[in-house]
C-alpha cells in the first residue's frame, strides 16, 4: 500500500497507541474525583499538560485540550467574539482557510469578515494587512500551512505587524504545521493543532491560549482540565497527545529532510508529464503537493489509483462535495485546474521507493 493522504490523517504510532491503552487500563479515575484514583489520574493529566506546554514553550495554563482542530478553531473564533463584545466585530482572514474556519465565519451574525490580499506566491500582502488593521478588527485568523496547497504563511512577521499596529487577537490554525516545520508562538495569541496529523490518535487536539487573552467557553459545565472547556477530561487521549507530540518533534528535522527529498523527486517527475500542472508553489510545505491532470476528473484518478492500493485525495478532507477546488479557482481563476486537482501529502513514514512506484503507476494510467 502507498498512502499519500497524510494531510487528512496519519498512521497511529505504536508507542502512542500503547500509551493510550496503558492509561485506559490503569488510570480509571476521573481526574476531578477527590479519591486516590482520581488524584492519580489528575497527576498524570497535569504531567501530560506540562509536557505539552514545555514542548511548545508556553505555560501550562495556556494549554486547552479539545476533540479536534475544528473544535479548537471554533472555540478561538466564537470564544473571542463572546469575550470581547465591545470591540469592532471585524475579522480578517484569507480565502485559503480550512472549512472549519470559513464555514464557521459564515455562521456568525453581525460580523464583517474581510479577506486579506495575497501576493503572487499566495502569501499575505503585508502592506494590505497593515492597511486593514486600521479598521481595528477584533481578530485575525489565518492558517500557518494551507491544507490544500501547502502554502506557508510567515506567522512570526504577521504576528509582529499585528502587535505593532493594532489590538487585534491573532489566531493561527497550525494543524498542518506543528511537528512538520518550525513553529514559533511568540507573536501568536491562539494556536490550533490536532494529534492525528502527526501520528497521534483521532479525537484529541489543542488550542493554545496565551495567558493575557480572554476566551468564552463553547461548552459549559463542571470542573475539567480547564475552565475554557467543560467535560470529563479524556485522560488516555491527553496522555497519548503528549507522547505523539514528543516523538514527532524529536524526529522533526530528520523527517523534514527526508520528505523534502521525496517532494523534490515527485515534483521533478510530475513536471515531466505534459498533462500535469503543479499547483503548489516552490516554497510550499514539502509535505503537500497539489497538482492537476488535464482532462481527467480527480475522482476517476483516485479510484484508478485505489485499485493499485495507492491513496491520495482530491482536496482537503473536510471540504464540501463541490466538484471543484474553491481555493485553486479563487487563486488561479482557472476552472479546469480547480476541477482536476489532486492532493498528494507525505509524512515521516513515506519513502522514495513509494514515490517511484507511484510515478510509474500514474504514468501507466494516463
Image (cartoon, rainbow, N blue to C red):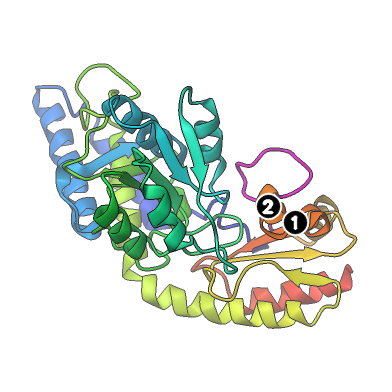
Whether residue 67 can be seen here: no
> Which labelled disc corresponds to residue 278?
none
Dominant SS of magenta comes to loop
Between marks 1 and 2, how big is the CA–CA gap?
A: 6 Å
Q: Position of residue 279 (x, y in %)?
A: 69, 66
Residue behind mark 1: 333
When asked about the image quadrant of residue 352, the answer is bottom right
Report the front residue among 37 and 156: 156
Position of the N terminus, as image quadrant, is bottom right
Q: Which residues are magenta?
A: 311-325
Secondary element type, mark 2: helix
Relative to 332, residue 113 above or below:
above
Q: Which residue is mark 2?
A: 330
Q: Nearer the viewer, residue 264 or 52?
A: 264
Name, please, the residue furthest toward the top.
Answer: 221
Q: Nearer the viewer, residue 344 or 47?
A: 344
Report helix, strand or loop for mark 1.
loop
The quarter of the picture where the C terminus appears is: bottom right
Neighbour tally class for label 2: few under 14, some 14-19, many 20 plus, Cα within 10 Å: few
Q: Position of residue 46 (x, y in %)?
A: 15, 41
Q: Quadrant of residue 40?
A: top left
Residue 320 among magenta residues: yes
Q: Is residue 37 visible?
A: yes
Q: Is residue 184 left or right of residue 284?
A: left
Residue at (50% x, 32% y) in the render: 104
Give coordinates of residue 36: x percent, y percent: 9, 28
Q: How many marks?
A: 2
Q: In the rendered image of this protein, does residue 29 appear above or below residue 90?
A: above
Please say if the residues under marks 1 and 2 sit with CB atoms less than 8 Å apart: yes
**Which residue is found at the position 28% from the left and 23% from the top?**
230
Residue 83: image location, x then y, percent? 27, 27
Amino acid at each position: 500500500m502507498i498512502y499519500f493522504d497524510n494531510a487528512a490523517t496519519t498512521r497511529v504510532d505504536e508507542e502512542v497507541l500503547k500509551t493510550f491503552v496503558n492509561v485506559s487500563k490503569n488510570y480509571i479515575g476521573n481526574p476531578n474525583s477527590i479519591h486516590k484514583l482520581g488524584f492519580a489520574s489528575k497527576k498524570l493529566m497535569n504531567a501530560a499538560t506540562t509536557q505539552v506546554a514545555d514542548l511548545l514553550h508556553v505555560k501550562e495554563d495556556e494549554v486547552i485540550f479539545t476533540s479536534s482542530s475544528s473544535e479548537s478553531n471554533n472555540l478561538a473564533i466564537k470564544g473571542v467574539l463572546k469575550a470581547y463584545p465591545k470591540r469592532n466585530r471585524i475579522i480578517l482572514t484569507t480565502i485559503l482557510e480550512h472549512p472549519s474556519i470559513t464555514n464557521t465565519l459564515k455562521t456568525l451574525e453581525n460580523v464583517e469578515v474581510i479577506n486579506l490580499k495575497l501576493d503572487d506566491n499566495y502569501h499575505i500582502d503585508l502592506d494590505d494587512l497593515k492597511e486593514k488593521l486600521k479598521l481595528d478588527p477584533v481578530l485575525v485568523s489565518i492558517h500557518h500551512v494551507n491544507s490544500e496547497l501547502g502554502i506557508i504563511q510567515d506567522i512570526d512577521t504577521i504576528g509582529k505587524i499585528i502587535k505593532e499596529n493594532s489590538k487585534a487577537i491573532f489566531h493561527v490554525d497550525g494543524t498542518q504545521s506543528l511537528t512538520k516545520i518550525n513553529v514559533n508562538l511568540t507573536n501568536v495569541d491562539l494556536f490550533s493543532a490536532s494529534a492525528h496529523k502527526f501520528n497521534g490518535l483521532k479525537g484529541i487536539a489543542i488550542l493554545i491560549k496565551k495567558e493575557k487573552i480572554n476566551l468564552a467557553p463553547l461548552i459549559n459545565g463542571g470542573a475539567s482540565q480547564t475552565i475554557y472547556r467543560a467535560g470529563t477530561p479524556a485522560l488516555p487521549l491527553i496522555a497519548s497527545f503528549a507522547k505523539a507530540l514528543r516523538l514527532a518533534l524529536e524526529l522533526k528535522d530528520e523527517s523534514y529532510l527526508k520528505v523534502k527529498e521525496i517532494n523534490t523527486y515527485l515534483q521533478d517527475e510530475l513536471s515531466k508529464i505534459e498533462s500535469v500542472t503543479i499547483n503548489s508553489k516552490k516554497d510550499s510545505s514539502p509535505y503537500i503537493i497539489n497538482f492537476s491532470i488535464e482532462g481527467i476528473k480527480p475522482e476517476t484518478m483516485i479510484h484508478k489509483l485505489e485499485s493499485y492500493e495507492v491513496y491520495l485525495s482530491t482536496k482537503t478532507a473536510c471540504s464540501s462535495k463541490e466538484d471543484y477546488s474553491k481555493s485553486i479557482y479563487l487563486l488561479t481563476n482557472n476552472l479546469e485546474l480547480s476541477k482536476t486537482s489532486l492532493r498528494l501529502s507525505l509524512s515521516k513514514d513515506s519513502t522514495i521507493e513509494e514515490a517511484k512506484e507511484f510515478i510509474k503507476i500514474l504514468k501507466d494510467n494516463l
